[in-house]
Image: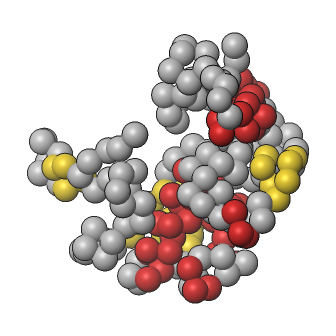
Amino acid sequence: FRINHHVDEKTGVPIFSIYGKTKKPTPEMLKNIDVLIFDIQDVGTRFYTYISTMSLCMEAAAENGIQFIVLDRPNPITGNLVEGPVLKPEFKSFVGIHPIALRHGMTVGELAKMFNEQGWLANGIRADLYIVKMKKWRRSFWYGELGLKWVKPSPNMPTPTTALLYPGMGLLEACNVSEGRGTTRPFEN
């Protein structure tokens, strides 16, 4: 699945894809940028690639002297449960970029802070990080308890239930077994 660079028809603003050949913003992409903002809903699982994207964007921002702001979002499968193995560094990839548990129990803001403070960005570089914190979120909350409408963060994550099932079912993706991607209820059937 690739998304290409293009220009917004209404504004003429260039849109650069970091979900194609390029995974980390280049200096050219960040030219004339004062601040880089991350506002994406994670699902609480290490191999959901949005947190890898966040880490690579943090690196690019740090390397180019740009402030990085994270608009924190709730972990839809609670912040109380941490489960599964911690990624071994030799298995680092885009689907597992840092040594965290499979079900990490953190918000994107907490992850960004950890990536930064642990020195896990390339060459130990640190981002000029600012986190816009959530109000009224508690670690024990499931997404359904928040009173918020679920906006699917990707086509294969249509419900909070899908996010709950993903940590276990996502392990099957490397096998010759269908976990239901492309259906209306992935990971559920």
Horizontal side of 140 relative to 154 (left or right) equals right
Q: Position of residue 58 (x, y in %)?
A: 51, 70
Q: Residue visible at 23% across and 52% down?
A: 5
Q: Position of residue 77 (x, y in %)?
A: 76, 37
- Residue 145 visible (yes or no): yes
Image quadrant in which the N terminus is located: top left
Residue 32 vertical placement versus 48 (above, below)? below
Q: Position of residue 26 (x, y in %)?
A: 33, 71
Q: In which quadrant of the rendered view does residue 93 lie? A: bottom right
Q: Residue visible at 70% across and 51% down?
A: 46
Colour convention: secondary structure
Q: Residue visible at 43% across and 74% down?
A: 60
Count of numbered tags: 0
Horizontal side of 120 relative to 59 (left or right) equals right
Q: Nearer the viewer, residue 135 or 32?
A: 32
Q: Position of residue 69 (x, y in %)?
A: 50, 65
Q: Nearer the viewer, residue 76 or 57?
A: 57
